[in-house]
Image (cartoon, rainbow, N blue to C red):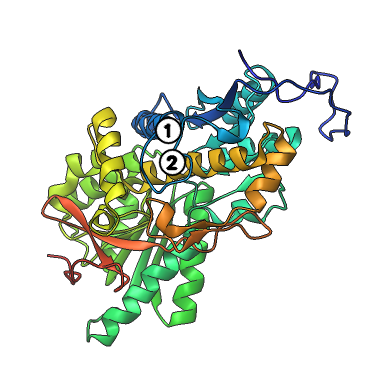
């Protein structure tokens, strides 16, 4: 049966500010319903399809018994709720923040979800998290990286993964390390789309460049999903920076590289803010044009050598999706595990009790599939212990090149 989170009517007459209400006693939940909100149609549909497989992999591990040193793996279902099983309800936000807002409200009021996980686009996370806050439903921002998301004073917002200030700091640490080895890195070109993801990313990189003494010779903001990037690439070509730093989703990233080829511009080096540059679709389309490209990330399959369960769980995901985990699918997987673990410890499907359990989370990094120190949220719901990595695309696959303690190969610099 479908569980009801609370018997509160929030229809057209309800105001945005919720008044505390006395909740009736409730029966033990037979299932736990979690909403998952992603782009399942439109230009970003492949992201949503892959996300669905990542969440289904996590759900399998939660609902069945596996011998992994991972929260929720051992035993079947939610032991804190009498063995209740997890049921996922997927919603399609179509990369539209207002559609995301409506779908989040539908998941809460009609599907009666106890929590929501999402959303890929940071612009959609803004509206979804606002709805979750209004209804006091915990929201885990599985793979959104805009730093401003956790700084809005929301009580029900949580993010286990790094944000773009953390990712960008890793990039500049890498630049500093390369300079110490005698490499020339003086000028940078920023290229970023105009939604909250690109804008926040560029702001973080501008500040770091000023702090570390790098010169920004181009700072180009373009319209997301633009039909042409010719004028922008001409500016990049004229600037000819030592490093091009794109913050672009998949279709824009493909168009950028194709336009660079058409205009005869070969970047000396590319260090990308993940997004499209972590997606198989981009490398299938233009990978031959960018050997040696570097992207930041949260996940490295290299970790399987030290932590065998990472390889086994990756195999489960690959059986469903035909792909290895990447930076997005790994964060999506862990987002659901972190949420389920909190619900299990809360021994409740009540939003406030789940929120309290999330606040109390202290998950050792060794019990995740990520190269993180641990999962522990600060007062704003951000995990500051999620150490990023830099990955380089060589020979048709990504290898970890930074930081040194996680690296399995030396960076090829400059790019081939």
Helix, strand or loop at label 2? It is: helix
Judging depth in this view, the residue of 336 and 239 nearest the camera is: 336
Of labels 1 and 2, earlier in sequence is 1
Mark 1: few/some/many CA within 10 Å (<14, 14-19, 20+): many
Going by the picture, which residue comes out furthest to the top?
A: 1
Is residue 407 found left or right of 142 in the rendered image? left
Residue at 50% in and 37% down:
119
- Can residue 186 be seen in this snapshot? no
Which residue carries the number 1 mark? Answer: 55
Judging depth in this view, the residue of 361 and 277 nearest the camera is: 361
Image x and y of residue 209, in percent: 44, 75
- Can residue 8 be seen in this snapshot? yes
Image quarter in which the N terminus is found: top right
Is residue 349 found left or right of 281 in the rendered image? right
Q: Are marks 1 and 2 in contact (CB under 8 Å)?
A: yes
Residue at 41% in and 35% down:
58
Disc sitting over residue 319 in the figure? none
Is residue 175 found left or right of 19 in the rendered image? left
Image x and y of residue 282, in percent: 25, 42
Image quarter in which the C terminus is found: bottom left
Which residue carries the number 2 mark? Answer: 332
């Amino acid at each position: 049966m479908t569980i009801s989170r609370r018997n509160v009517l929030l229809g057209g007459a309800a105001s945005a500010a919720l008044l505390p209400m006395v909740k009736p006693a409730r029966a033990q939940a037979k299932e736990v319903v979690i909403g998952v909100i992603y782009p399942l149609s439109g230009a970003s549909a492949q992201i949503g399809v892959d996300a669905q497989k990542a969440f289904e992999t996590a759900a399998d591990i939660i609902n069945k018994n596996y011998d992994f040193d991972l929260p929720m793996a051992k035993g079947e279902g939610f032991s804190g709720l009498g063995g209740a099983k997890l049921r996922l309800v997927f919603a399609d936000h179509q990369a539209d923040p207002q559609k995301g807002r409506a779908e989040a409200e539908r998941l809460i009021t009609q599907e009666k979800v106890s929590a929501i996980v999402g959303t890929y686009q940071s612009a959609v996370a803004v509206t979804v998290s606002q709805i979750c806050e209004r209804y006091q439903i915990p929201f885990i921002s599985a793979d959104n990286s805009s730093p401003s998301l956790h700084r809005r004073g929301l009580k029900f917002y949580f993010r286990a993964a790094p944000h773009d200030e953390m990712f960008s700091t890793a990039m500049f640490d890498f630049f500093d390390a390369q300079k110490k080895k005698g490499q020339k890195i003086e000028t940078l070109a920023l290229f970023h789309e105009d939604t909250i993801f690109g804008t926040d990313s560029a702001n973080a990189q501008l500040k770091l460049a000023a702090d570390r003494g790098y010169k920004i010779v181009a700072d180009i903001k373009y319209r997301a999903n633009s039909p042409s990037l010719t004028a922008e690439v001409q500016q990049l070509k004229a600037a000819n920076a030592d490093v091009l730093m794109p913050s672009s989703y998949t279709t824009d990233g493909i168009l950028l590289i194709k336009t660079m080829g058409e205009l005869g511009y070969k970047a000396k080096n590319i260090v990308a803010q993940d997004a499209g540059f972590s997606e198989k679709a981009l490398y299938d389309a233009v990978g031959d044009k960018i050997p040696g490209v570097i992207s930041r990330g949260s996940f490295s399959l290299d970790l399987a050598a030290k932590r065998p369960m990472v390889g086994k769980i990756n195999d489960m995901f690959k059986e469903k999706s035909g792909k290895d985990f990447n930076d997005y699918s790994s964060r999506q997987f862990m987002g659901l595990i972190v949420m389920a673990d909190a619900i299990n410890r809360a021994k409740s499907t009540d939003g406030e009790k789940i929120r309290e359990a999330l606040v109390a989370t202290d998950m050792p990094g060794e019990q995740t599939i990520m190269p993180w120190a641990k999962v522990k949220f600060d007062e704003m719901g951000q995990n500051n212990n999620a150490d990023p990595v830099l990955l380089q695309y060589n020979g048709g696959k990504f290898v970890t090149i930074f930081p040194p303690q996680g690296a399995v190969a030396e960076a090829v610099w400059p790019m081939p």
